[in-house]
Image (cartoon, coloured by chain):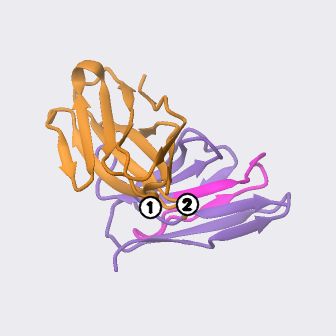
Chain colours: A orange, B purple
Amino acid sequence: AQKVTQAQTEISVVEKEDVTLDCVYETRDTTYYLFWYKQPPSGELVFLIRRNSFDEQNEISGRYSWNFQKSTSSFNFTITASQVVDSAVYFCALGLYGNKLVFGAGTILRVKS
Amino acid sequence: DGGITQSPKYLFRKEGQNVTLSCEQNLNHDAMYWYRQDPGQGLRLIYYSQIVNDFQKGDIAEGYSVSREKKESFPLTVTSAQKNPTAFYLCASSMGSGGTDTQYFGPGTRLTVL
């Protein structure tokens, strides 16, 4: 069975703090994809990143970075120097060939000024 | 601008009524999806379509129906058989099918049953 666990229901930080959102996935497939989406208060899901299971290189995009570790089945997301505009719900998702996306329950991030 | 549009943004329904939620995309994507989101929960797949005139049930299809007569359109009907339809509904599309291509989402429709 495929499963995505985002153990942190809600995180609160003060602006400029760094914050890491955890994502742990379960699958027996050797080929799969991992995604992160951001859902601001407006409701629309915004795509952030897509990684395949063969690419374990960490990725950095501005203040965002992602750490993919197959050994621990984790795909964690770090925001450096958080800003109020980062406040949103963040979803991690697992995708497999011939199958649908499996979403985690999401982590609510609140960044206070 | 390419993207996905959903209408209406807010919808109110009386019990026993069917309502149809619109989803249109101009991304030339083959696959389209409907998800339901309840407060504090992740997204659950209702229906998906990989090509025109074909669609498959997702995890929670009971009480819903869809059609895919055109590549760019994938309307969702919430029928009176859906026992608890109050939720946020999101439409998505992707170039290919399955869980490997990136899905892009519309702004959502918030349905409330009065």
Disc 2 marks which amino acid?
Answer: Pro
Query: Looking at the picture, how far across and down is residue B100, in whole percent?
Result: 29, 44
Q: Which residues are magenta?
A: B67-90
Residue under the image location 41 percent in, 62 percent down:
B52
In this picture, residue B10 sits left or right of residue A29? right
Q: Nearer the viewer, residue B39 or A60?
A: A60
The circle on residue A41 is 2
Q: Secondary structure at mark 1?
A: helix
- In reply to whether residue A37 is colored magenta, the answer given is no
Q: In the rendered view, tell whether residue A98 sits above or below residue B35.
A: above
Q: Is residue B7 above or below residue A15?
A: below
Location of residue B28 (image quadrant): bottom left
Mark 2 Cα within 10 Å, few/some/many (few <14, many 20+)? Answer: few
Quadrant showing the N terminus of chain B:
bottom left
What residue is drawn where x is 29% and y is 58%?
Answer: B95
Q: Main secondary structure of the magenta part?
A: loop
The answer to which of A46 and A22 lies nearer the viewer is A22
Residue B23 on image: x %, y %: 52, 68
Foreground disc of the pair 2, 1: 1
Query: What type is the residue that disc 1 sits on?
Result: Val
Q: Chain of mark 1?
A: A
Residue A85 bears which disc, if any?
1
Horizontally, residue A10 falls left or right of residue B100, namely right
- Taking the image as shown, residue B13 lies to the left or right of residue A47, namely right
Marks 2/1 in contact by CB < 8 Å: the verdict is: no
| Residue displayed at 49% across by 57% down | A113
**Helix, strand or loop for disc 2:** loop
Mark 1 crowdedness (10 Å alpha carbons): few <14, some 14-19, many ≥20:
few
Q: Position of residue B2 (x, y in %)?
A: 34, 75
